[in-house]
Image (cartoon, rainbow, N blue to C red):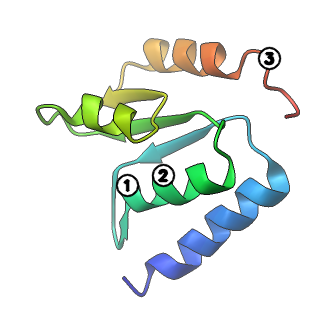
């Protein structure tokens, strides 16, 4: 867990100072829990869409969406679908 603190602080700084239109997030990352990153990101920017990349586990998509994910893609993600999702989720958000 010690290695996760710099990433969490960096995420907090980026969201507050840069106001991204969207976040992509892998749910499984070395040394940090993707669920916790998503939870923290939503407390800072509640309306920012988050796209999750995850392994295909039963009920994972439903669970992630109930926790705030705007879209969930299983690995390997279909890049055309991912780009379409990004376009859809960021439409009208530029500069917010």
Can you tell which quarter of the image residue 23 is in?
A: top right
Q: Find the residue positioned furthest to the left.
A: 58
* Real-space CA distance between mark 2 and mark 3, rounded to the nearest whole angstrom: 22 Å
Q: Measured from the top left, where is residue 76 in percent x and y?
A: 29, 30
Q: Are marks 2 and 3 in contact (CB under 8 Å)?
A: no
Which residue is disc 3 drawn over? 92
Quadrant including the N terminus: bottom left
Decide if residue 47 is on the left or right side of residue 72. right
**Residue at horizontal 35 percent and vertical 26 percent from the top:** 77
Q: How many marks?
A: 3
Q: Earlier in the sequence, mark 2 or mark 3?
A: 2
Q: Quadrant of residue 31?
A: bottom left
- Check disc 3: other Cα within 10 Å, few if <14, some if 14-19, many if 20+: few
Q: Going 88% across and 33% down the picture, which residue do you hit?
A: 95
Identify the image quadrant of the C terminus: top right
**Left or right: 76 with respect to 59?**
right
Question: Which mark identifies residue 38?
Answer: 2
Cα–Cα gap, marks 2 and 1: 5 Å
The residue identified by callout 1 is 35
Residue at 84%, 27% (x, y): give it.
94
């Amino acid at each position: 867990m010690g290695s996760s603190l710099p990433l969490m602080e960096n995420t907090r700084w980026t969201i507050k100072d840069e106001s991204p239109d969207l976040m992509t997030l892998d749910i499984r990352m070395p040394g940090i829990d993707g669920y916790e990153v998503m939870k923290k990101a939503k407390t800072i920017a509640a309306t920012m869409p988050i796209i999750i990349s995850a392994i295909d586990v039963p009920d994972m998509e439903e669970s992630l969406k109930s926790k705030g994910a705007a879209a969930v893609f299983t690995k390997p993600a279909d890049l055309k679908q991912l780009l379409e999702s990004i376009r859809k989720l960021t439409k009208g958000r530029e500069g917010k």
